Image: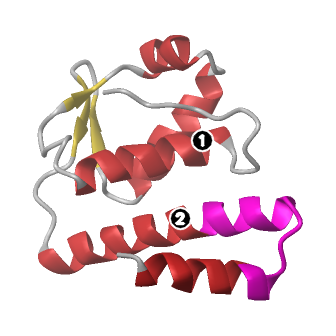
Amino acid sequence: MRLQIEPESPVPIYVQIEDQVRALIAAGQLRPGDQLPTIRQLAVDLGVNYNTVARAYLELERAGVITTQRGRGTFVAGVPDEARQAQRREEQLRAILRAAVDEAIRLGYNRGEIAAAFWDEMGRR
C-alpha cells in the first residue's frame, strides 16, 4: 500500500490517510481481506505520529471500511453492498472536489472562477 501525505495541505493528515485508503479500495487496488500495514509501520513509512495513523484507522473501522482482528492485524472489510460502495465512491469524489476547491480558495480564486474552470475542464473530457 502506497500513500502520499502532503504536510502543507489544509486537509488533516489523518483525513488524507482515510481518503487514500478509501480510494485504493474503490479503485480495487485493495480488496476485502487484504491486510493493511500496522499502525506503527505506516506511521514510520509516512513519517507521521503514531496517533495520527491510529485515528485514521479508528475512523475507517467505525465506518466499516476496515476491521481489526486482535493479534492478527488490520484488514479491508468484507465485500460491501452496492449501496455502500456507491456511497463510498461519492464520498471519495466529494473529498477530491473539496480538496481542490479548498486549495483554489486558498490561492485566492473566487467561486465564479472556480466554477468556470471546473465546467471548462468537464467540457474537455
Q: Nearer the viewer, residue 100 or 18?
A: 100
Characterize the magenta stretch by its predominant secondary structure.
helix
**Residue 103 on the magenta segment:** yes
Read off the residue under disc 1.
14
**Which residue is at 61% across, 15% downward?**
47
Residue 23 image point, x, y percent: 35, 52
The N terminus - image quarter: top left
Q: Quadrant of residue 111?
A: bottom right
Q: First in sequence: mark 2 or mark 1?
A: 1
Q: Nearer the viewer, residue 29 or 36?
A: 29
Above or below — where is 111 with respect to 101? below
**Residue 61 on the magenta segment:** no
**Which residue is at 26% across, 18% downward?**
71
**Which residue is at 41% across, 77% downward?**
124
Callout 2 amino acid: Ala
Residue 58 image point, x, y percent: 48, 44
The C terminus - image quarter: bottom left
Tell me, for residue 120, which label it has, or none: none
Which element carries disc 2, helix, strand or loop? helix
Q: Nearer the viewer, mark 2 or mark 1?
A: 2
Callout 1 amino acid: Tyr
Residue 48 image point, x, y percent: 64, 21
Read off the residue under disc 2.
95
Farthest residue toward the right? Answer: 108
Above or below — where is 103 with respect to 60? below
Is 57 displayed left or right of 76 in the figure? right
Is 6 displayed left or right of 87 in the figure? right
**Which residue is at 63% across, 63% downward?**
100
Provide the residue span drawn in magenta: 98-113
